[in-house]
């Protein structure tokens, strides 16, 4: 079972890691993810725990940080109180500086008093949290580090630096909370697609319902300016839809009677009456909301590394600080404990891992947000990281590289008229939703009487076997004919060939052609320019057609005439051949290619809106049918990984240098403040750049 809780007051990334680690040790908990960015706790657990799960988890969280509460509704962090305390503390600090250095009072007790007042205004809560956490056995968090460092500075008489460290620390915390709020707001903007109500037509009247209570078959009325609350088919009206929230595209889409429409789009003009085709829980909006809400539950390698790094790094640095404070004075002459204690306190200030723990998840969050703005939904930061490392892209052909809009080009009939042949095949294909079936039915163009079809079976990768008016109709490829011992007159035309047999006798074939997408060739060139070394196409179509498409697009390798299971085998072969630490992506339509999408390092579903298979099987869902979005996704992923590497390198190098200089006595506590707060702010600013990027 799975549940999601909201954690109000979770403003410490280190605390989030501790909560996650402790909950993982609980019996019955199968998987734990603390999504710091969204203040969420995602739990997977055995069913026998459901009754007392909330109380047990709440108890664990309280033992780690009593300021965190489990809430039902997300609460935005209010910074007004923190900002007010910071300003008051800053004013008191300035007064203390003036009294301490400008006005020469004896022993300057008044200046010291203002330093103490300023310290407790800005740092009192930090000290109190440190004490509470220490009583619970939780050491080595930022509250402990800042409290020890600043109180120690007071003890050795470094009053200005003690208060300044706490002031700058709180400034960094304010900036961090603002950045996190900004990031949450960016992703939360995607949640605007959630409909508040549905206008249902009942007995000639319009009644407002909760979308969850609307049933399949109900007629809903959507006025101009309203969101479409559920997926359905238009039964009355013509309008233009704003699909920006779903696809990232600003061009309105014209719709009329008979068109399928998706929840989350906004009606721009007139009134639409829509027949609901699925309940809210299965609608496009619901699937997208679920994807977005759980987007941070899958962590990247970099995030997992930082979590482990900070877990060991901080205690080691604290241990080194203790040794630095007390060992040198015992062995070196002409020195004092106060000098080395001061150096050790600087060590403690530097050791806080905030810059890394905050900026890395924030960077991935920014990348995911930038992709979402472009109509690309990434299920987790691990997939964004894998996308940046992609060296091979494998494509499905039909509906991915081609338009998937087939047209009948040639009908060849033997011992039967072409019209009769087309009619029988159209009847045989009636229950199939395959693009080839649709093209045949479209070419027939007449009403199909279902009572004349007594049996119909679709064989994936082969074709159709149907009983029409008591006659057995076989329509499919050469493999289907061979399997049923039908000798055929082979067709050498370029296109998809549907061979037809009636009552075991071959009677002709239909040639169907598909068109390559207009921008497909340009996208292949762009992918090559981005360093994608190999482009592969897997198709169930004939080898001649596959080679023709590959040659036109510049694709390196073609594997044709594949059944769905054979596509899986081919992709596994490619995975076995890949370079270490490089990834293979598969791009498909998300319906017939679900097994291959799941197997690939990165499964990319094209035009996946409204498709259960796309949402469930793919790691990345491109909301439109545009191939160029793959290029956008790769560019965004690489920008994200570049920012992550910059933040990791910058933070570690600066901290190590300042630690080294602190030990030698070259740097002061002011340097330590920059290495902690300054580096955090710079790393966060660098991460926030991604939220403003579309490519």
Image (spheres, rainbow, N blue to C red):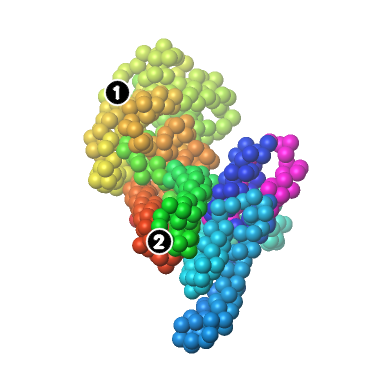
Q: Which mark is residue 491?
A: 1
The image quadrant of residue 682 is bottom left
Task: Name the quarter where the C terminus is drawn.
Answer: bottom left
| Whole-number angstrom distance, CA of label 2 to CA of label 1 | 99 Å
Residue 449 in view, yes or no: yes
- Say which quadrant the N terminus sits in: top right
Circle nearer the viewer, 2 or 1: 2
The answer to whether 316 appears left or right of 19 in the picture is: left
Residue 217 location in percent, x, y? 64, 47
Above or below, 62 relative to 434: below
Q: Camera-side residue: 566 or 296? A: 296
Q: Where in the figure is residue 498, as x and y percent of width and height?
A: 38, 26
Mark carried by residue 334: 2
Q: Say which mark, if any, is on residue 201.
A: none
The stretch of residues the image draws in magenta is 37-62
Q: Residue at x 43, y 46 (%)?
A: 302
- Rendered residue at 49%/82% (across/down): 100
Indicate which disc, 2 or 1, sits on the residue closer to the N terminus.
Answer: 2
| Apparent side of residue 86 relative to residue 674 in the rendered image (left or right) | right
Residue at horizontal 66 percent and vertical 58 percent from the top: 132
> Residue at left 63%, top 43%?
23
Instruction: Say which of 133 and 293 sits in front.
Output: 133
Where does the image place residue 123, in percent across and percent down from the top left? 58, 68
């Amino acid at each position: 079972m799975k549940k999601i809780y909201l954690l109000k007051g979770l403003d410490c990334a280190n605390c989030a890691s501790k909560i996650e680690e402790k909950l993982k040790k609980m019996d019955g908990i199968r998987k734990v993810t603390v999504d710091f960015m969204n203040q969420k706790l995602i739990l997977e657990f055995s069913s026998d725990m459901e009754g007392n799960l909330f109380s047990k988890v709440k108890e664990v969280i309280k033992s780690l940080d009593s300021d965190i509460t489990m809430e039902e509704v997300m609460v935005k962090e209010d910074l007004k109180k923190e900002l007010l305390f910071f300003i008051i503390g800053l004013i008191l600090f300035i007064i203390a500086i003036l009294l301490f250095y400008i006005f020469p009072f004896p022993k300057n007790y008044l200046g010291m008093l203002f330093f103490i007042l300023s310290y407790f205004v800005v740092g009192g809560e930090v000290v109190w949290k440190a004490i509470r956490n220490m009583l619970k056995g939780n050491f080595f968090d930022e509250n402990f580090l800042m409290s020890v460092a600043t109180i120690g500075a007071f003890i050795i008489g470094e009053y200005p630096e003690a208060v300044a460290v706490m002031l700058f620390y709180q400034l960094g915390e304010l900036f961090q909370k603002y950045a996190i709020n900004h990031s949450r707001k960016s992703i939360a903007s995607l949640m605007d697609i959630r409909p508040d109500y549905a206008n249902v037509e009942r007995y000639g009247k319009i009644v407002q319902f909760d979308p969850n209570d609307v049933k399949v078959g109900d007629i809903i009325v959507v006025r101009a300016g309203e969101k479409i609350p559920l997926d359905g088919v238009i039964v009355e009206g013509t309008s233009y839809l704003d699909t920006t929230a779903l696809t990232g595209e600003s061009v309105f889409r014209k719709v009329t009677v008979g068109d399928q429409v998706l929840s989350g789009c906004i009606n721009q003009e007139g009134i639409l009456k829509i027949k609901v085709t699925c309940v809210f829980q299965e609608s496009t909006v619901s699937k997208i909301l679920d994807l977005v809400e759980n987007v941070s539950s899958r962590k990247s390698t970099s995030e997992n590394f930082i979590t482990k790094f900070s877990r060991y790094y901080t205690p080691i640095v604290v241990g080194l600080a203790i040794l630095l404070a007390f060992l040198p004075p015992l062995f070196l002459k002409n020195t004092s404990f106060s000098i080395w204690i001061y150096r050790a306190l600087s060590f403690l200030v530097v050791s806080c891992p905030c810059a890394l723990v905050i900026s890395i998840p924030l960077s991935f969050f920014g990348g995911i947000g930038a992709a979402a703005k472009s109509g690309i939904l990434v299920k987790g930061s691990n997939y964004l990281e894998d996308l940046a490392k992609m060296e091979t892209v494998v494509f499905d052909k039909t509906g991915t590289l081609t338009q998937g809009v087939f047209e009948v080009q040639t009908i060849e009939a033997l011992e039967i008229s072409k019209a009769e042949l087309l009619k029988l095949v159209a009847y045989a294909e009636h229950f199939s939703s395959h693009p080839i079936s649709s093209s045949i039915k479209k070419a027939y163009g007449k009403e199909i009487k279902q009572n004349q079809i007594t049996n119909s079976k679709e064989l994936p990768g082969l074709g159709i076997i149907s009983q029409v008016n008591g006659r057995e109709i076989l329509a499919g490829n050469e493999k289907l004919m061979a399997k049923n011992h039908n000798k055929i007159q082979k067709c050498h035309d370029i296109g998809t060939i549907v061979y037809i047999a009636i009552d075991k006798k071959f009677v002709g074939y239909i040639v169907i052609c598909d068109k390559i997408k207009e921008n497909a060739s340009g996208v292949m060139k762009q992918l090559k320019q981005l360093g994608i070394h190999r482009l592969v196409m897997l198709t169930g179509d004939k080898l001649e057609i596959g080679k023709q498409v590959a040659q036109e697009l510049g694709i390196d390798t073609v594997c044709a005439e594949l059944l769905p299971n054979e596509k899986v085998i081919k992709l596994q072969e490619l995975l076995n051949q890949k370079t270490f630490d490089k990834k293979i992506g598969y791009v498909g339509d998300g319906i017939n290619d679900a097994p291959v999408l799941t197997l690939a390092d990165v499964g990319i579903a094209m035009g996946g809106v409204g498709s259960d298979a796309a949402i469930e099987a793919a790691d990345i869902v491109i909301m439109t049918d545009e191939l160029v979005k793959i290029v956008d996704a790769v560019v965004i992923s690489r920008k994200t990984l570049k920012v992550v590497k910059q933040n990791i390198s910058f933070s570690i190098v600066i901290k190590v240098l300042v630690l080294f200089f602190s030990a030698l006595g070259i740097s002061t506590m002011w340097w330590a403040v920059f290495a902690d707060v300054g580096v955090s702010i710079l790393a966060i600013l660098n991460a926030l750049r991604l939220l403003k990027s579309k490519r």
